[in-house]
Image (cartoon, rainbow, N blue to C red):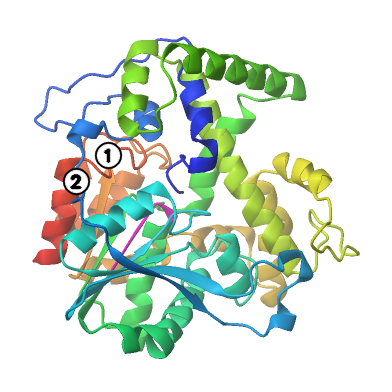
């Protein structure tokens, strides 16, 4: 899962924090200074600005890279605006290590979390490549071999093949690299584990270090949790409309009283002042995840000829109205996608696959033995991460041993930009 904040819905979070309730933030009794005790709140508000590891004022040298991966006729007319695979390069003018950074579920290199991480590592002297997650629309269209995303092994193999082409055809001619590194967060963290295993087999990049940041241990488990945040709190169109009206009212109030300042520090101050209730935070997180899932499901459906959300008879183009299909997808959970598209696709390839087999493959368990002995692969996580089910933190500690850094709080990615967390990442790759 990616951190449930994006530029397009940032105001929703601001509004949601205006809801009344009784959740409190304070410094813990331990020596870990990240201040937000409640994991839902941490997931939403992130890191207060004064506790962030800040980037320099220097503007990174960058280039938006475009790679033609498929003939134009293989791109459905529905996606006429996605004819190339896109990724972002921050580069140094001298030989330097290169780190690939992979976004979370449905995420792209242009998200605030991605750009911040990229800038941090560029400041440290790395070439940096920001990558869309294999569940992002542009990758599903241009990088996925199946168009049906959701199993980390297959999605990561597709990504690995695209990266080999990007290096061979573009990057190797533009930058001089001393070593290769890789990291990713949320679902991108899960895929980072698979990236290590695939690179071990193929020996193309020979990654020196890989770090999993707040990975999902099992995607099915995680999306079940996130789907429940939406389904348990918005059970009817009337409830959805009422929540929407509260958001609109709160947004107006916020604009009148505080002014709209889009920053993590503003969110944190507002959180302390308003003390939102857990149900409101769950609903916000659930809405953001549902929006991300909508894009994944609709794109996968179109790439496979339709029939799940988009009618198979539709040939959409530039001016086609897709409002009805957006409404249908908003009512469709990720578990519906698993049952209705992903599971049938893989069972059609291998009829012997049971439902439990596919769920097992949707995570890190199939490569547990490899990860136990992969000394160059580490993981950072939070005890209270909201996308993990009971026992999964302990599973990570058992598998990674002393290569697992488990922070006492932070929710899902809420502390990713906290000073201690960033310094740990730098130290891990710098060893």
Q: Quadrant of residue 61?
A: bottom left
Place of residue 285 in the rendered image (x, y in percent of width and height, measured from the top left): 51, 34
User: Relative to 360, does residue 15 appear above or below in the rendering?
Assistant: above
Q: Residue at x 26, y 58 (%)?
A: 59
Give the number of the disc on residue 393: none
Q: Quadrant of residue 264?
A: top left
Dot 1 lies on which element? Answer: loop
Q: Residue at x 9, y 30 (%)?
A: 31
State whether residue 338 appears in this view. Answer: no
Give the number of the disc on residue 421: 2
User: 331 or 141: which is nearer to us?
Assistant: 141
Place of residue 6 in the rendered image (x, y in percent of width and height, measured from the top left): 48, 42
Place of residue 261 in the rendered image (x, y in percent of width and height, measured from the top left): 40, 28
- The kind of secondary structure the magenta stretch mainly shows is strand
Q: Residue at x 53, y 39 (%)?
A: 226
Region in magenta:
182-187
Mark 1 = which residue? Answer: 415
Q: Quadrant of residue 71?
A: bottom right
Dot 2 lies on which element? Answer: helix
Q: Residue at x 58, y 75 (%)?
A: 84
How far is the residue under mark 2 from the one under mark 1?
Answer: 7 Å
Do tag 2 and tag 1 residues touch (Cβ < 8 Å)? yes
Place of residue 18 in the rendered image (x, y in percent of width and height, measured from the top left): 47, 15
């Amino acid at each position: 899962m990616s951190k449930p904040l994006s530029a397009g819905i940032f105001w929703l979070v601001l509004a949601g924090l205006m809801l009344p309730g009784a959740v409190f933030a304070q410094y813990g009794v331990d020596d870990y200074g990240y201040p937000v005790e409640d994991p839902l709140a941490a997931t939403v508000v992130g890191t207060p600005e004064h506790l962030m590891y800040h980037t320099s004022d220097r503007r990174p040298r960058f280039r938006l890279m475009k790679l033609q991966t498929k003939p134009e006729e293989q791109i459905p007319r529905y996606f006429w605006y996605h004819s190339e695979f896109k990724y972002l390069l921050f580069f140094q003018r001298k030989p330097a290590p290169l780190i690939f950074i992979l976004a979370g579920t449905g995420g792209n290199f242009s998200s605030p979390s991605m750009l911040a991480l990229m800038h941090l590592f560029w400041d440290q002297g790395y070439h940096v490549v920001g990558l869309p997650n294999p569940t992002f629309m542009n990758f599903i269209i241009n990088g996925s071999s199946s168009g049906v995303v959701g199993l980390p092994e297959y999605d990561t193999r597709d990504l690995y093949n695209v990266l080999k082409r990007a290096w061979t055809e573009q990057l190797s001619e533009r930058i001089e690299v001393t070593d290769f590194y890789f990291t990713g967060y949320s679902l991108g963290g899960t895929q980072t584990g698979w990236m290590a295993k695939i690179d071990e087999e193929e020996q193309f990049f020979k990654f020196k270090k890989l770090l999993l940041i707040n990975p999902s241990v099992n995607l099915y488990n995680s999306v079940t949790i996130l789907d429940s945040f939406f389904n348990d709190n918005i059970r009817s169109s009337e409830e959805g409309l009422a929540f929407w009206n509260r958001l609109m009212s709160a947004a107006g109030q916020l604009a009148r009283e505080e002014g709209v300042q889009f920053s993590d520090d503003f969110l944190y101050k507002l959180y302390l002042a308003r003390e939102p209730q857990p149900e409101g935070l769950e609903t916000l997180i659930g809405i953001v995840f549902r929006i991300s899932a909508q894009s994944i499901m609709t794109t996968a459906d179109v790439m496979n000829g339709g029939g799940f959300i988009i009618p198979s008879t539709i040939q959409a183009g530039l001016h086609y109205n897709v409002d009805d299909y957006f409404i249908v997808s908003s009512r469709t959970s990720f578990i519906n996608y698993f049952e209705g598209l992903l599971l049938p696709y893989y069972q059609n390839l291998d009829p012997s696959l049971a439902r439990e087999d596919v769920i097992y493959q949707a995570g890190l368990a199939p490569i547990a033995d490899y990860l136990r002995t992969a000394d160059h692969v580490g993981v950072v996580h939070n005890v209270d991460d909201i996308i993990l089910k009971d026992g999964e933190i302990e599973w990570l500690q058992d598998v990674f041993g002393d290569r697992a850094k488990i922070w006492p709080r932070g929710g899902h990615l809420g502390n990713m930009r906290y000073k201690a967390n960033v310094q740990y990442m730098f130290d891990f790759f710098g060893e």
